[in-house]
Amino acid sequence: MTQEKSAREELEYWSTVELDSAEVARRASLLILDFEAHPEKYTDPEDVASPFCQIVGLFQQPTDKDAAVTLRTEALPALLRLYDARLREWRKVGPQEGYDSAASDLLFVLKIFAMYRGEEPLQRIIDAARIPLDSDGYMWSVVLSALVNAEPEAATHVVSALREPLPPGFIAVALLDMANTLAREHGVTSHSFDTAQGRELLRAFLTDKDPEHFSYAHSAAASLPFLTDSREFFTLAMEHPDVGVRMEVAWAAARGGDALAVARLQDWSKDPKTRKRAVTYLTELGIQPAPVPEEDRARLEAMAEMIQWLEYPTEFGRVPDHLEVYDHRRLFWPPTKDERDVWLFRYRYEDEGSEPEEGVGMVGSVTFALFGETTAELPPEDIYALHCVWELQQEGDERAPKERTIQAGRKLLGFR
């Protein structure tokens, strides 16, 4: 076995190891230092995984405080040097097709810097935003979220350093989200977008009619309670075509004591399409949702749960065009070993120029839709049967059959 192959295998091994003690972290640090000195040993054109990213990933693996301290002391200086060298290479070549991976690698390192913090790592984040490094990279949201979650004081330092001028592109959106979190959850009183440039950017977000940018308007609306004068922006947000933006500005107004805004949120809490979000806002405000008749509440909650799941970006990404109850019953559910209410909902998405997309999803245990397996052409018992087997399989339950079949599920549920 060649030395080069041995080094790559060693890296593959350490990529799966939990760093659960200072001693284990010290051995991982030696590997990182060796990679810095001899990167050629770890590189092969046929490798799918980037050895650089695997090295960076080691900094995410401490499960013990002493291990994290050891890695910070013995290996973080090497990561700073590796980052600087890779950044110089990226700046020399410049952004171009086929070289996006270098920017992605650098943003991954910035996430680690956000986790470990310290003067030099934080300065690297500030400098990267100023360059700017991949200004449209969505990884910036991950970087700044990691920072504000780890240490609000460090996040405040970064957001203040980037206040004027604000960085371009999506970096500004990620910075806006971080500034909102600092104001909303940590009491930071000086919002970084409460400047001439910041207000102009908020106005642009709120008037942008591109649906792909509606999330920017949502972030802009979330900042309104923390600006010195936001009356103009309230008007723009209330006229926005996206209901999520209108709900956000209603929360902002209700936070300031606007009774009409509270009433709007309560109205939204009665609609399954908006209930989940409205209840979240009202709970944060310490206000009860609109009363719902007892006989309707369970159906409303279940329907809202199904809609929220279908809205996930990894699913359909939006509210279905049609949703109706397909079945509701109370039964003993084997995966949870208890009796509970379960629901099936039939949904349909309609897109101009294509056939409607239909399916059936389940609520009551794990909210899910078995795409391609469950349709309204199946009786409800068969759909419950498939979901029961699927859920047991996901849990690795010994009762789960090897194959997901209706017959196996019906037997588990006691259906004839």
Image: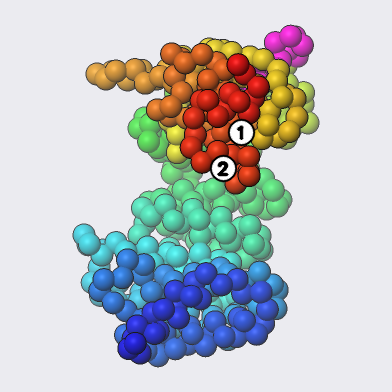
**Marks 1/2: CA distance?**
10 Å
Q: Position of residue 55 (x, y in %)?
A: 45, 75
Q: Which of the pair 117/411 is nearer the observer?
A: 411
Q: Position of residue 119 (x, y in %)?
A: 58, 76
Q: Is residue 85 left or right of residue 187?
A: left
Question: Is label 2 in a helix, a strand or a loop?
Answer: helix
Question: Is label 1 in a helix, a strand or a loop?
Answer: loop
Most frequent secondary structure within the magenta stretch: helix
Q: Nearer the viewer, mark 1 or mark 2?
A: 2
- Residues tagged 1 and 2 counted as in contact (Cβ below 8 A): yes
Circle number at residue 366: 1
* Rendered image quadrant of residue 22: bottom right
Amino acid at pointer 1: Val
Q: Residue at x 24, y 18 (%)?
A: 353
Task: Name the image quarter holding the C terminus.
Answer: top right
Residue 303 visible in the picture: no
Please tell me how crowded label 1 is: few (under 14), some (14-19), or many (20+) other residues with Cα within 10 Å.
Answer: few
Q: Position of residue 283 (x, y in %)?
A: 74, 31
When the figure is inspected, residue 6 is found, relative to residue 367, above or below; the finding is below
Which residues, given as a range, are shown in magenta?
291-307
Task: Name the image quarter holding the N terminus.
Answer: bottom left
Q: Give the residue at mark 2.
A: 394
Q: Is residue 328 left or right of residue 46?
A: right
Please tell me how crowded label 2 is: few (under 14), some (14-19), or many (20+) other residues with Cα within 10 Å.
Answer: few
Q: Residue at x 49, y 53 (%)?
A: 141
Q: Residue at x 25, y 68 (%)?
A: 94
* Rendered image quadrant of residue 336: top right
Q: Earlier in the sequence, mark 1 or mark 2?
A: 1
Q: Is residue 357 left or right of residue 285?
A: left
Q: Is residue 373 magenta?
A: no
Amino acid at pointer 2: Gln
Q: Which of the pair 3/120 is nearer the observer?
A: 3
